């Protein structure tokens, strides 16, 4: 029976329910211990192989602010942030992700994090002085999905630069917005994250109930992280927000003027999912960075959940060009707590790319209507093969 049937379909073409009807046959057990009260995604720590090249990309080109740095690590923040950092660049032999870090509501929530993950049998480490500069008592875990996750409350406050308009650039990055994680079993991951208190805002499914991706949040936006179906665990991207879409266009112009347009992987464009204007870049190590703006508020308890049909070619691009294959297939490795790459588990369900490639001629915009002739051939060329 179709999982899409019986839902309310909107005039915009997607389906709306009060809670995401995502079910798993292989759930992570729900601990009896209470989960930590998570506020928001706070920072990501990535491993880079050439610190100087990465510094140029993130500081000189994208305009993030250096809070502190030395010969092995750089701490960066967006212009409206008041905690010590949103991104850590740490030099290492293998590019990867060391931590997806969340801030919790109080110091007492760290005890809950230890109890919650210990009950699950996960590896848990706690450091009273933190794992990075500027962050105090912290807990890092290898979660049941294979990701290195950190929780913290104590942080050094730094100057919020929101009023320093002399420092704003045309493409100013103002906030860390979200993470995106690649995982082979999206329903299993969704159920586990719901146990942590996350709520689904949007998802992509097909008529057989296969779930290809889900967007989940703690703060009152579309997501703090997304769960994308694929071989994992891997990091798909980290996203920073701008105020307006013209800021994203300014970044494109800057990259072009610096002869760095090859760092643009996809976009600019408008997503169907999240409604956000976007641009995807690749840093010198291939880590994917999204620049993102203009999603919507989700904080009410009865916020409707949006489900997209995987065959709707406007789900990934409300308008624009096809999703390039690298966007579906490539992602950053994630590390265990010793700094070694986590082994990958293959996705066994159908992949989104195998079913349809983005906004292309192989899917439909309006179900039951054929694509116009001029659309049918153009996306079978070149990199779309």
Image (cartoon, rainbow, N blue to C red):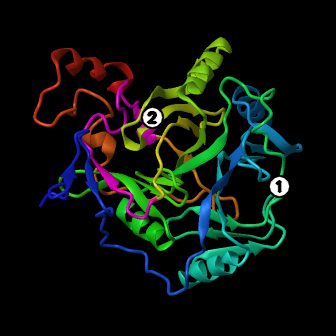
Q: What mark, if any, has residue 126 been given in the picture?
A: none
Which residue is disc 1 drawn over? 157
Spot occupied by residue 94 in the image (x, y as percentages of width and height): 68, 47
Identity of the residue drawn at 69% across and 75% down: 110
Residue 292 image position (x, y, % from top left): 54, 37
- Horizontal side of 302 relative to 5 (left or right) equals right
| Residue 292 sits above or below residue 132 on the image | above
Query: Which of these two is toward me, 370 or 166?
Result: 166
> Is residue 144 placed above or below 302 in the rendered structure?
below
- Secondary structure beneath label 1: loop
Q: Looking at the image, which is closer to me, 104 or 358? A: 104
Residue 351 shown left or right of residue 338 in the figure: left
In the image, farthest residue toward the right: 70
Whether residue 61 sits left or right of residue 320 in the image: it is right
Report the number of discs: 2
Mark 2, residue position: 326
Q: Secondary structure at mark 2?
A: helix
Q: Residues within 10 Å of mark 1 (few under 14, many from 20)?
A: few
Distance CA(mark 1)–CA(mark 2): 38 Å
Quarter of the image with the C terminus is top left
Q: Quick check: 100 above or below 196? A: above
Query: Is residue 213 at least partly visible in the picture?
Result: no
**Residue 244 at what x, y percent from top left?**
56, 30
What residue do we see at 56% from left, 23% from top?
246
State whether residue 315 appears in this view: yes
- Please report whichever mark, 1 or 2, sits nearer to the chain's N-terminal start: 1
State which quadrant residue 183 falls in: bottom left
Q: Residue at x 51, y 28 (%)?
A: 265
Magenta span covers which residues? 300-329
Depth-wise, is mark 1 or mark 2 nearer the camera? Answer: 1
């Amino acid at each position: 029976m179709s999982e899409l049937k019986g839902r309310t379909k909107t005039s915009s073409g997607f389906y709306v329910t009060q809670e995401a009807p995502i079910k798993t046959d292989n759930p992570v057990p729900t601990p009896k211990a209470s989960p930590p009260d998570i506020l928001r995604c706070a920072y990501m720590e990535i491993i880079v192989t050439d610190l100087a090249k990465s510094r140029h990309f993130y500081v000189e080109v994208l305009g993030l602010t250096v809070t502190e740095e030395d010969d092995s690590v750089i701490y960066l923040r967006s212009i409206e942030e008041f905690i010590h950092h949103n991104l850590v660049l740490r030099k290492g032999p293998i590019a990867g992700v060391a931590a997806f870090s969340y801030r919790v509501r109080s110091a007492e929530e760290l005890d809950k994090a230890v109890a919650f993950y210990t009950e699950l049998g996960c590896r848990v480490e706690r450091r009273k002085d933190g794992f990075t500069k500027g962050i105090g008592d912290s807990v890092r875990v290898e979660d049941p999905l294979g990701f290195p996750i950190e929780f913290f409350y104590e942080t050094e406050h730094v100057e919020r630069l929101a009023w320093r308009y002399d420092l704003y650039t045309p493409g100013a990055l103002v906030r860390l917005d979200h993470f995106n994680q690649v995982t082979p079993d999206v329903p299993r991951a969704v159920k586990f994250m719901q146990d942590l208190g996350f709520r689904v805002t949007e998802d992509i499914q097909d008529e057989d109930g296969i779930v290809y991706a889900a967007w989940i949040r703690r703060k009152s936006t579309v997501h703090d992280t997304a769960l994308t179906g694929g071989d994992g665990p891997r990091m798909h991207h980290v996203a920073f927000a701008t105020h307006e879409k013209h800021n994203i266009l300014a970044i494109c112009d800057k990259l072009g003027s610096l002869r760095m347009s090859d760092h643009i992987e996809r976009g600019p464009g408008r997503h169907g999912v999240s409604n956000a204007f976007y641009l995807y870049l690749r840093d010198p190590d291939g880590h994917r960075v999204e620049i993102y703006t203009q999603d919507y508020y989700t904080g009410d308890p009865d916020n409707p959940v949006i489900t997209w049909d995987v065959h709707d070619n406007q789900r990934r691009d409300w308008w624009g060009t096809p999703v390039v294959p690298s966007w579906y297939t490539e992602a950053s490795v994630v590390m265990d707590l010793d700094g070694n790459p986590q082994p990958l588990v293959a996705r066994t369900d159908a992949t989104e790319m195998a079913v349809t490639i983005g906004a292309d001629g192989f899917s439909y915009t309006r179900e039951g209507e054929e694509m116009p002739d001029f659309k049918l051939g153009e996306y079978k060329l070149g990199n779309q093969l």
